[in-house]
Amino acid sequence: MDFSSSISINKMQPQIQIFFLLFFFLVGFASAGNLQNPDFESPPKNVSSDSSNPFVTLNENNTIPGWTFQGTVSYVTASPNISLPDNGHAIQLGEDGKINQTFNAGADFMNYILTFTLIPGGQNCSANANLLVSGSDTQGIFSFKQHYGKEAWQSYGLFLGLGGSSYNLEFTLGDANDACEGDFIVQVQAGPVVQNFTVRSNGTGSAQKSSLKFDAAGSRATPISFLSYTTIQTKDGILCGPVIDDVVLLSSGGSRMVIKLNVLISLLLFLILVL
């Protein structure tokens, strides 16, 4: 038996400085088949393919296939001044911007995970901008937290599962084979369970497997996050940090959900928060 579920993403409040946000969204057990136009590669109507303007403001005659929207929303195309994964497309949400889609969730897939990456527009940008992601009977508020490292992004996950169920979060911690040596400390949180993991890096691609057990938080969404507490520099003075890979979520019933961080590009939002 199928049932309808709705997801929506919107900006919460204005910020003093420009803030860029990249949002990767994966629905279901590593399946994006539930969503229409999940990566926005199908452009809005009446958009010229040879347009030189990377921003196209949407209106009632110029909508995104598969999506509804409210407020100020623009369609964004990668350009020399706007870097997007795979030189693709994205969405810009204005101060009151919101996008929404309703999809059929099959009975075989009662657990879903929203995964996303936040990226600021620059070193001096505001770090307290919030993004509200909501689904049926649940929602999550996310923001970019100040950090130090070579890569200017932070990845988060919002798990939507059955209340009271037990799960085991498995993952691999290591280094990027970039001559980054030292002890990496990573805080992993899954619902109410928080634990620090330490991995010794020799800078040559070392890795170790770890796991964390937790219970789903009732009828509420269960957030999953990885946070690095370590700042290390290579001999060349380049900031570096740990690598997280092979993330797998195992339910008490034996169901297996693989979260491949390198392919979480099912839904890409490009959010610019302005005053």
Image (spheres, helix red, strand yellow):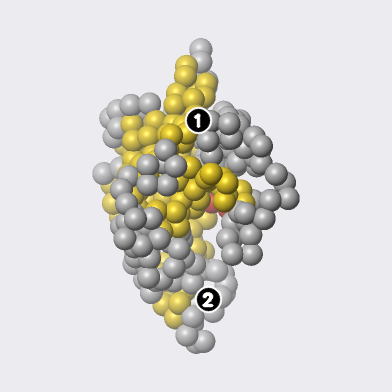
Is residue 119 left or right of 127 when viewed as pictured?
right
Q: What residue sits right under mark 2 in the picture?
A: 203
Task: From the viewer's side, name the closer residue of 188 and 49.
Answer: 49
Q: Tell me the residue at 51%/87% (across/down).
A: 236
At label 1, the amino acid type is: Thr
- 128 left or right of 97 in image: left
Residue at the farthest right position: 50
Image coordinates for residue 102, horizontal then vertical, percent: 49, 25
**Residue beneath label 1, please?**
68
* Direction from residue 266 to residue 170 in the image, left or right: left
The answer to whether mark 1 and mark 2 are in CB contact below 8 A is no
- Image position, residue 63 (x, y; %): 57, 34
Q: Secondary structure at mark 1?
A: strand
Badge 2 amino acid: Gly
Figure check: 123 above or below 71? below
| Quadrant in which the C terminus appears | bottom left
Check the image and report above or below for 196 versus 214. Answer: below
Q: Residue at x 66, y 41 (%)?
A: 47
Looking at the rendered structure, the secondary structure element under dot 2 is loop
Q: Nearer the viewer, residue 75 or 28?
A: 75
